Every structure is written in structure tokens, then in C-alpha cells.
Image (cartoon, coloured by chain):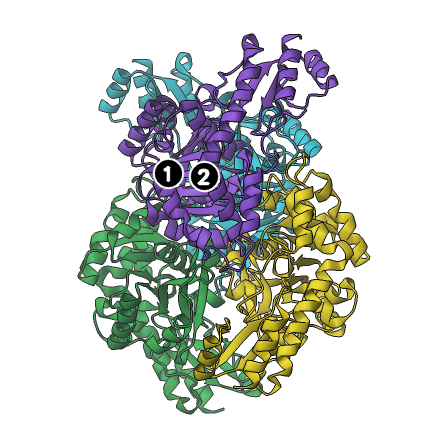
Chain colours: A yellow, B purple, C green, D cyan
Amino acid sequence: MQFLSDNAAAVHPRVWEAMKAADTADAPYDNDALSRALDERFSALFGRECAALWVATGTAANCLALSALVPPHGAAVCHREAHIEMDEAGAPGFFLHGAKLLLADGESAKLTPQGIAAVIDPIRDDVHQVQPHAISITQASEYGCVYRPEELEAIAALAGARGLGLHVDGARFGNAVAFLGCGAGEAVGAADVLSFGFVKNGAMSAEAIVFFDPEMAATVRYRRKRAGHLQSKGRFLAAQIHAMLEGDLWLANARAANAAAAELAGACSQRLLHPVEANELFLACTPVERAALREQGFGFYDWGEDAARLVTAWDAKAEHVTALARAIAAL
Amino acid sequence: MQFLSDNAAAVHPRVWEAMKAADTADAPYDNDALSRALDERFSALFGRECAALWVATGTAANCLALSALVPPHGAAVCHREAHIEMDEAGAPGFFLHGAKLLLADGESAKLTPQGIAAVIDPIRDDVHQVQPHAISITQASEYGCVYRPEELEAIAALAGARGLGLHVDGARFGNAVAFLGCGAGEAVGAADVLSFGFVKNGAMSAEAIVFFDPEMAATVRYRRKRAGHLQSKGRFLAAQIHAMLEGDLWLANARAANAAAAELAGACSQRLLHPVEANELFLACTPVERAALREQGFGFYDWGEDAARLVTAWDAKAEHVTALARAIAAL
Amino acid sequence: MQFLSDNAAAVHPRVWEAMKAADTADAPYDNDALSRALDERFSALFGRECAALWVATGTAANCLALSALVPPHGAAVCHREAHIEMDEAGAPGFFLHGAKLLLADGESAKLTPQGIAAVIDPIRDDVHQVQPHAISITQASEYGCVYRPEELEAIAALAGARGLGLHVDGARFGNAVAFLGCGAGEAVGAADVLSFGFVKNGAMSAEAIVFFDPEMAATVRYRRKRAGHLQSKGRFLAAQIHAMLEGDLWLANARAANAAAAELAGACSQRLLHPVEANELFLACTPVERAALREQGFGFYDWGEDAARLVTAWDAKAEHVTALARAIAAL
Amino acid sequence: MQFLSDNAAAVHPRVWEAMKAADTADAPYDNDALSRALDERFSALFGRECAALWVATGTAANCLALSALVPPHGAAVCHREAHIEMDEAGAPGFFLHGAKLLLADGESAKLTPQGIAAVIDPIRDDVHQVQPHAISITQASEYGCVYRPEELEAIAALAGARGLGLHVDGARFGNAVAFLGCGAGEAVGAADVLSFGFVKNGAMSAEAIVFFDPEMAATVRYRRKRAGHLQSKGRFLAAQIHAMLEGDLWLANARAANAAAAELAGACSQRLLHPVEANELFLACTPVERAALREQGFGFYDWGEDAARLVTAWDAKAEHVTALARAIAAL
């Protein structure tokens, strides 16, 4: 009964089907019909013109997205606990040729205009200090919390006022939209580019970089190839994305994961360290309690000394979730 | 009837089966059982201790392999028409932080000790000139030609004498081994690292970087993650590789592709610009002749003004091959 | 009456003389007699075998030094207010190809083993997190404070235990040695490499990178050229360094600057935000007070809202120092 | 009697005077009065608005200039024997983050529109091949030959038609202008940026990057600092440049060097491998002949097996030149 992460969950049957269906001759790289249809598909979803590129990982999606916004001598502001800072092995430094991440604070790994300003305001406008060129936020955040449309608006306003680009790491974008109950467009606000994650939500190996300024995609196409991320059988990545979007499978899967998380949250509301808005729970939990849960067969990560992280995937089994909820309640 | 490339061919049914079988819970990244079994598998195949990392593309495989051999201020010698020079969008410059490729000449895109020496001998041993640190050869070459074991030995001897690392781009390594009829180890010689290609030979999205010095892999693991190439559901890449190696599927597929190429070669031996040893043919062919072939439904690439490139894939249909052979003969 | 910085102070007459004396024909780059004599000179000064390279700036010295210790996928630990983090425009990211700086805390911009451990202990030993490869400290620190030999020993012990390299940014190394009253070797401890600054201390445009492991210099020679820092008339940089070392001019100049700082410190001991150990003072000072000082003709930098930074250079005029001391005392 | 190179020649007395005169308090970096006056000075010289940045070396000048024209995923076309390709240790790869140099052919290291087209025309307009973004030419060329205004015009026209930037490496720009007898503006044509060399022509350590689009300089200012090339006592570099420009010292010095070369050329017109237009001579000369010259006390470089390179500096002594001319004639 694994609640370690959603990142290694099963592949949804409809994704499998779409991949199998793509196993016919077509042009290589992203010249196949499925890849060529992505721009239109995302444009329809977001209600504005988009250009979308597939890649296999969220790290590649985030860093290629940022490469359109930040020059090598610049910086992006992100949360101190952002995935790009903590868990991508310095990939932004590689893809951005040494550009910096400027670390801001904020509750539950969410940035605020105040938190961002606290980081960039002290930067002298001279060549000795690295200047910010973009803001990167995570929707839903690394602590499973969701930016509301008005929060996105406030950050976008700051970005606009300071001439900064805005990137959204949407590794769990589906979970955010499912929580907000709004359209995809509202959940991303006036961002320039979105890393739209599918792998944690039922796909196998396909994420989309969605550019809301299609011109940006032109340069990133070169960067994607140059980073070894242009797969020759790219039709299999495009197929996954189409399957996830078809009939809003991405939303259905995210809702399932969120519902499981909500059930668990209901069982331990006193223990929660962050609001449970998506599919991650962070709960106070002593080593003895964690050991007790593990003895009952539940897998999860420790989160520091006295907490645990639980993640529910799209395919979480109802009986496992209920069993865990009970086990936690019984601690 | 496509003879454009093998890079977008179908996925072999046994690869599909293995991928489906991998769709069960396991650890993320390369901590799953399948990924962890790769070192042993390749060690058995090559008869010496190896460490193997999967990646999704040949470009990533080549560049990560080279990153273990060439520092940012160094260079690798490769053929003037090597894939890393011609068709990877400058990826070596990205992965190697600006290291150079030094371009050597040789028949049919194969390097020789003489050709390599002609490039590196004139380099002054001072800080003003970029010093070579490695040699990269392609087995089979970009013109479908295969290094014989004694040719590999001679290059490895030069590399050893000059203190250079040796990398083999094996995007079509299977075709080379199938042609040589020798063991995998003999077909790679004393190389330090091999990019072992599977995507052109029946896999979907998995190549292996095989390090014959396992210590090299330790650093490259960080570089792979940093380049966004560590997929969280890596088990699906490992599964592809195991399926390709199981029962020597890689060899069977390569033999099929080579046989198709040989059949075509038999129909146009007067036209051949390079010996046909693997699964690529380069033949003299006027624009009029090419138009005639295309009218009959054959797809292929022009190769300059008066030549064509034909590539046979593992799944080339016998009737298509025969039809093309006849059509060429009838020109 | 400028107390803005020591970085634009005059050039010492003996440095001028040495430069003029070098204006004769000699070999280019660092093949001249003066450049070739540097290794021996620094070896004598530090009492162990050194290899020394000149460069024109402290930024180049620091970053080239670090490039010998930190691979592109690694990190160096430094103080949150270290010059390499705050005032070098992201140069470490450039020279180290995207490697990270991990920011530690400590009084007066000095690191401690505890502060360093607090940063590196939480780093998981996996490929998702950037691993530390070196520690960089500044002697004297950015707040004008000096590491005692036993403090250096403790940091070097930690570095050794964790397998980390140790770099010392000695932009004001002379001031540190002058304060400690010890030998140069004791003031740098078991560091691997020192950026030995001369420009702030009477030279025009020459700093030395001193490698205590001479083998490291071999690679950095290539990196220096590659970074455009190998001047063809390098003899003029070597001449500056020799002049600074001759008769311990570097120490005499540093003592003069320190003495001036000490005189000022005596006049405002209640206001000091950091101990005055070298040639920098940070003092509490309201905007009104700062305006008053400026009206009397004193130049200096604001340091946040309610503080000022004063720096005394080697050529500070006694009457200016005394005047400023009085002016501060009279506030 | 040295004819090895002009790169380590003496510093002109007027440069020394200007440097001494700059040894007064002024603002650090390039905030001093001399540095701030450079834009205007070069604007007057070239008759159009310029922005100029000093750096200490030609390598830094060339690479920072190119960084304004070529993105990391792009390429610059240069001659196969260009200094940036042959003698800068891969610096373009470092400063441009792995961008490529595409090598073109041409007589005497001069590019022609045909030579450039031969390199860029075969490049497919797809993401697999590195796209050219700029052309870099050397005025005077590495073989001491000078582009005529109409040749510059033709290259600029090609650059314009293909959307390529144009960089001129003017390490010996003075010698080119002296030869052409035209204005500085005509000798650089419609270039975007010029590396204006002074070190080989009487300065100590100052070159200028002259941007004919002043906006380009804004970004390069950050890159210069980031590369460790922003010296804190920058006033000494600016002083050198002003001294070289004052009263056209740069032209007088270049004329002297050219005249010396012309005198030598007159003595060996049969031996010349390239026209002598600036201050370099390449002459057929057997090993025995070279030994004979060296025995008479003349220093110079071998150029392959059967040739020699002679370079005359601004301070070449008339009696040395005449002696060498006679010695060559007597061979």
C-alpha cells in the first residue's frame, strides 16, 4: 500500500491504448500528425493561442521553459523549497548556463508578491548583482497547496510591473485545476509558459511545455534538440498527451487523487502541517507512529524528524486509502 | 513503402509486452528492479564489468558518454560527418560546456589512426590550442560501414598512446555486430564507453550508455539527472532494453534490417557510393530517377544532387524490399 | 576624503617602478622571466610548494580557483554574504558551468563548521540534490573580520572529513595577515587554493591564484586562457606581484590600512556592528548623521537604512583619517 | 632583434604618461571619467553612435562581442584559420555556452561571400543542425591581409540578407586602417561590433569592444563582469585607450609597423606567401635558411616546414629592420 509518490504510479489504460494506436508509420521527431496537433489542442484548452512541445520529464520541461525567459547572466525567483531548487540536481544551472535561482519565502511553498519583492527589491541595479528576469511558481505547490486565481493575478501583476517573465511548474497542474474547479486558463493566469505535467497523473513519459507566446517555442525547439530531448519516435509522447486531454482524463485522474488525499486528510486534520488542497499530505507524525504505520504495510516518506509525507496517486485503491485513513486515526 | 529512416520504425511486439509487464508498482527513477539489473546484463553480454544507464535518445547517450571523457576546455576527435557533429544541434557543446569537436577525414565516415593523427598532430601543446581528450567513432558509421576488430584495435592503440578516451556511438551497433558476426565485445573493442542504440532497432525510447569503466557511471548519473534525462518511470526504459537483449532480439532485428539492405544492394551494385555493410544504402541516382521511384510509392531522402539514401528498418516488409529492388534495377 | 573602498586606491610607487622596469622585450603571456619566477616566490612565502597564476581581477581569481575544486554538477558552500555570491554577477555560475553556491550563515560573514554542517548535512546523498564539493571562505571576511588559525583548522578538518576542497578568497588577505601577526601560511591554513589579492592593497591590476597542490594549476592554465585572462604582456602583472611581495610591501600597506581603520574604530566603538580587524568598518549611523558626515566632505557607502560602511585604503591620508575620526566622534 | 610578434612589444611612452596621470582618486570599475568618455570618443572616430567597453585581452573582446550576436544554440562563421578558432583555447565555446564556429575557406585567411555561402548554404533549416547567427572576420587577417571597403560591403550585404550579425576582430585594426588610408569607419564597414585592438600597437593591457548598436553593450556589460573582466581600477585601461586615440597615436604606430614590414617585404618579394599589407610577413624559407637568420640574431617563428613568420611591431628599430632585410636578401 504505497503512498510514497505519484511519480511512479501506473499508466492509465487509455494512455496505453493511444500509444499502441500510434505504433504505425509516421514521420520522425515531432513531424508526425499527433505532435503537430498539440498546438491546436492546447490552444483550445486554454482559450488562447499556444505552442506546445513535449518532453519526457518535468525537469526538462521546467528548465527549457525557463530558458525562454532567463539569459545566462540573469536569475529566476522561486520558492526556497521549489522543486527546481531542491530536487533537480542543479538542472536550471545547466540549461540556463549558470543563471541563478533567487530563493524567496512563503507559506506552504507558495510565493507572494511580498515574498518576491523581499528578494528582488534589495538587488542593486548594477552589473555586480545578478538581475531577476523571471518568476517561477509551482501550481500546485510542493506542499500540495493551490494558488487561487487572484493570487496568480497579483504575482503576474508584479511580474509585469518589474518586467519579469512568469513560469508555472505544473507537475501537478491537474490536481490544482481539480481543486479550483475552474478552467485550465484561470489556473495558470497570465503566465508566459507552463510545464504541464502528465507523468504523475497517468501518463508514462510525456510532459508538455505550453508557451502562451508561441514565438518563444521557436527557440526552445532548438534547445530541446540540443539537450537530447527530441525523441525520434515522438509520436508516442504526443499520443500520451492527447489521451490525457481526451475527455478530460487528466481532470478525472486528478480528482481521484485529490479525493483520496481528502479522505486521508479527514482522518488527521489535527496533524496537518499544510492545507490539503491537491494530492499531498504533510502530517505531524512521530517516529514511533511512523513505524506503526509501516508495520501495517503503508509506504511513505519521512519528512524531517517528526512528520511524514503521503502522496495519493490517480490509481490509489479505495481500500488502501480507507485502511490508511483508519490507521492514522487510530494512532 | 518507406525507406526514409529506421528511426521512426514500429516498436517490436516483445518490447510492448515487456513494457506492459513493467506496469506494476516499483521504485521510481532507476531504483526499480529492471533498472538495477542492467549492469549485470550488459556485463554478461560484453564479458567484462560494465555499468549501464538508460536514456531516451541517442543524442543524450552520446553526449553524456562524452562528458565522462572530455573536460569543458578539451576536445573530442570525430569524423567530419559524424552524427554528433552534423545532426545533434550542437548538443556536444551543450553537454560538454563548450568543448570542441575536432573533425577528421576518412572513407565512408570511418576514422583511421592516420586520419586522427592528421588532426591532432599539428596541435601545439600549449594553452592557446584546445587539446584532444577523446576519440568518438560510430559503429556502424554514418554511411553504414562497419569497423573491423583490427580497425578498432588500431584506433584504441592510438587512443591509448595519446592518453585519449574512446567513445563508440552505437546508434546502429546491432547492425554492426550482425554484419561482423562476432561478439558484442569484439565489435566495440577497447572503448571506454558505448552508446548502445535500441530505438532504431525495435525499441520505443530507450538507449543504453554502457561504461566499461563502471566508475565513470557514478558521475554521469548526476549529469543525467541534471540534464533532465532521469525519468521517474524509468522501469519502462529498462524493460525495453531487457526485451531487446532477451534472446538476442537486438541481433535478430539487426540481421533482418541488414538482409533487406543487402537485397537492395544486390539490385544496384553499380550505383553504390559506399559498401553496404549495415542497413543504409547510398546510391547514385539522378533527380529523374528519384522522381520515378517516388512515383512508384517509395519514400527516401535525397543525398545531395545526384544520390539517394535508403535505410531499411528491422520491420521492413519483404514485398516492399523486393519491389524497391526491382524498381531500382529497372531504372 | 574618500572612504568608499580600497578597490580604486592609488598604485604604489614601487609597483609603478617595477612595471616600468618590465617594459623591455620578453616572452609573451606567462613565459617571461617574471611570471616564471612566481611559483618559487610564493613557495618561499608559504613555506610549501605552490603554483601561482596571475589574473587581473579578484572575480577571475576566485572563479578559476573554484573551477579546480567543483565540477559543473557540484556545489561550493560559502557565506550568504560572500563576495562570490553577492557581488560577482553570477561569475561562479559562468566559470563553473552552472555549479551552485550553497549559502551558510555565520557571524560577520565568517563561516563555522556548525554553519557549514547546517547546510550540507540535510543534503540527501542522491542524484536529485546537488552535492557539495568545496568550501569557500573569505580572509578577511566581507565584514572585515579575520579567521584565527584555529578557526581555519576547524574548517579544514571538516572539509577533509567530508572530502571537500577548501578555497580562500583573499581579496584582503594582506589585511588579515597584518591583523594576525602570523605568517602567510598560518593565515591560510590547509586551504587548497588562495585568491591572493593585491589590487586593493597597492597594485594596479594583478591578483594571484596560489595553488597549494601545484597539479591543480595545470588545468586552470587552460581555463585561464579560455576565459580570456591570459594577457600577452603578462610580465606587467607579474611585475606588480613581485613588487608587492618584495620587502613585504603587501604587509606594510595592509598594516597602514588596518591602522587607519583602527583609529576610526577607536572613535566610534559604540557604533560598531562588527569587530574591526582589518580595514573595513560597519557602523550604526542614521541618515541624518550620514548626511552630516558627507557635508564635511567624507565619502562612504550607506549600508542599509541605518548604517554606513567605511573602508580605509593603504594610502589613506593621516589627516583625513583623523578628521573623520573626529567627525564621527562629534556626531 | 625580435620579429616574433607584436603582442609583447613595449608600451608607448604616451600610454605610460596617460596611465600615470590616471593615478588619482576616481570612481571604481568603469564609473571613472575616462571610462565614461569612451563612448563619445569612439562615436567621434567612427562618425556614428557607438558604445565602447574596455577589456584586457583580445580573446575577451572577441568573445564578449560575439556573445551579443550568437545564442548558445547558434553558430558564427569564421575562417578556418581565424584566431578565435585556432588560438583562443576554445574561448568562444566558453563565452557562448557551447555555440559553434563554422569554418570557411578563403585566401590569406580572408572570408568572401562565396566562402561563407559554401558553409551556410548546405545547412538544413531544421532543429538538428546548428544555425548560423553571425559572421566574424579579422581585419587585418591572420595572414596580414586587409579587407577593402568593397569586400566588407559584400560581406555585410550577405550578412544582412541572411539575418546574420557581423563581428570584426580588429586585433590589428590599426594596421588595416593604416594600409587602407581611409577612415576608421570605412575599414569596419557595416559591422555590428568591432574588437579594436591596442595591445599589439603600443598599449599595455587595453582593448575596446566597440558596439555600433549601443543597446548591445547593455547586456555585454553584465557578461563582462560575469567573466571577471571588469577591473576595479578600470581607469588605467581607459587611459591607455585615450592615449592611443589621442593625436591618432594608434595610426602612427601602425604606420611604423607597416612600414617596417614593407621594407622587409621589398627584400624578399619572391618568397612571399601572402601579400604584405599590414605588419606580418609569411615567407618561404628553408630550415637551413632559418637557421642562418637565427645565427645572425634574428628571432621569428617557423611556419610549418618551409616557411617563416615575421611580425614587425610599432617599436621595431630601423637598424634591425634594415639588417634583417639585408640578411634575407642575402640568403
How many badges with numbers are in the image? 2
- Does label 2 or label 1 sit earlier along the sequence? 1
Residue C285 position in % (x across, y down): 51, 86
Q: Nearer the viewer, residue D127 or C15?
A: D127
Badge 2 element: helix
Q: Quadrant of residue D218?
A: bottom right
Residue at (53, 68) in percent of width and height: A2
Q: Amino acid at mark 1?
A: Leu
Q: Is residue B159 above or below residue A114?
A: above
Residue A178 position in % (x across, y down): 73, 68
Q: Nearer the viewer, residue B65 or A277?
A: A277
Q: Residue furthest front?
A: A319
Residue identifier under label 2:
B245
Q: Nearer the viewer, residue B139 or A7?
A: A7
Residue identifier under label 1:
B45
Residue D243 seen anywhere in this rendered image of the structure: no
Q: Amino acid at mark 2?
A: Leu
Badge 1 element: helix
**From the viewer's perspective, is D163 left or right of B20?**
right
Tag 2 near tag 1, CB within 8 Å: yes
Residue at (65, 39) in percent of width and height: A23
Q: Which part of the image, by quadrant, shows the C terminus of chain B?
A: top right
Determine the chain carrying the residue at label 2.
Answer: B
Residue A102 position in % (x across, y down): 55, 67
